[in-house]
Image (cartoon, rainbow, N blue to C red):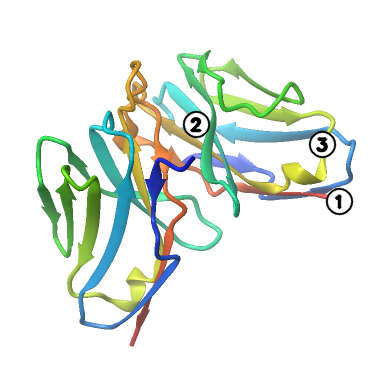
């Protein structure tokens, strides 16, 4: 049973517009959330994170929003650039039992930014 | 600084053969994670080492899989005997003190078992 879900396998946006990637989770013990970005033939790279005590974290063009009551987070990229085209993974940690090292990943969303 | 190094990058083998995947941690890191990525199950944690000691191997599929850290900078993941359902991309990642937000992934090994 998937505890972290990314329901959109793919998303296509125009350069300069906003990209919004969504993620839902079911485990209320998760207390730290991360987004990773993955290019073909490379490993995932850490992009941005948010603690459950916050509802927003911003880093340049990237902003992550957390809605704990809805168990939902989203990644906003503004403005989107062609180089942002990649697979984006949502991940969560802190599922209880001292497992803060353990990342539970969604299956990813392929973002394509068209010039 | 070199990142996490994995070898081989691609491996094609026949069912029943032994497969060994290798990983070199980033210098100074003391935690090591092995992940497997498949279309069906996505990215899954197989095993986690801290200071060369296996802490959590609950994700290891079955006894055919084994992982070791013979020293602080190197790890192997062995599958013996391999089966077609083991075909996947295997990633290792390293970090300092196991903090989830500082896991640095290698480029992965794409394993195909015929």
Secondary structure at badge 3 equals loop
Q: Earlier in the sequence, mark 1 or mark 2?
A: 2
Q: CA distance from mark 3 to mark 1?
A: 9 Å
Q: Quadrant of the image for the N terminus of chain B?
A: top left
- First in sequence: mark 2 or mark 3? 2
Residue B82 circle label: 3
Earlier-in-chain disc, 3 versus 1: 3
Q: Secondary structure at mark 2?
A: loop
Give the number of the mark in front: 1 or 2. Answer: 1
- Whether residue A35 sits left or right of residue B48 in the image: it is left
Q: Residue furthest bottom?
A: A115
How far separated are the C-alphas under marks 2 and 3?
A: 25 Å
Comparing B92 with A75, the one in front is A75
Residue to which mark 2 is pinned: B25
Confirm whether circles 2 and 3 share one chain.
Answer: yes
* Residue appearing at x 35%, y 44% in the figure: A91
Q: Residue A49, can we see it?
A: yes
Residue that mark 1 sits on: B114
Q: What chain letter is assigned to the residue under label 3?
A: B
Tell me the chain of label 2.
B
Label 1, label 2: how many angstroms apart (C-alpha)? Answer: 29 Å
Disc 2 crowd, CA 10 A, few/some/many (<14, 14-19, 20+): many
Q: Is residue A47 left or right of residue B58?
A: left
């Amino acid at each position: 049973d998937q505890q972290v879900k990314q329901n959109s396998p793919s998303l296509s946006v125009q350069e300069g517009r906003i990209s919004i990637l969504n993620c839902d989770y079911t485990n209320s013990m998760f207390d730290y959330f991360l987004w990773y970005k993955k290019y073909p033939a490379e490993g995932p790279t850490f992009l941005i994170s948010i603690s459950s005590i916050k509802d927003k974290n911003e880093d340049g063009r990237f902003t992550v929003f957390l809605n704990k009551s809805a168990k939902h987070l989203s990644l906003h990229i503004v403005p989107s650039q062609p180089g942002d085209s990649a697979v984006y993974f949502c991940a969560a940690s802190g599922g209880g039992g001292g497992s803060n090292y353990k990342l539970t990943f969604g299956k990813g969303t392929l973002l394509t930014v068209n010039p | 600084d070199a990142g996490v190094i994995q070898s081989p990058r691609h491996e094609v083998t026949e069912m029943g053969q032994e497969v060994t995947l290798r990983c070199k941690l980033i210098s100074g890191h003391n935690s090591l994670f092995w992940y497997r990525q498949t279309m069906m199950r996505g990215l899954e944690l197989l095993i986690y080492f801290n200071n060369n000691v296996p802490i959590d191997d609950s994700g290891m599929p079955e006894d055919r899989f084994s992982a070791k850290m013979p020293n602080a900078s190197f790890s192997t993941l062995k599958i013996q005997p391999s089966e077609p359902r083991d075909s996947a991309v295997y990633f290792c990642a390293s970090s300092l003190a196991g903090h989830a937000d500082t896991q640095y992934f290698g480029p992965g090994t794409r394993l195909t078992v015929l």
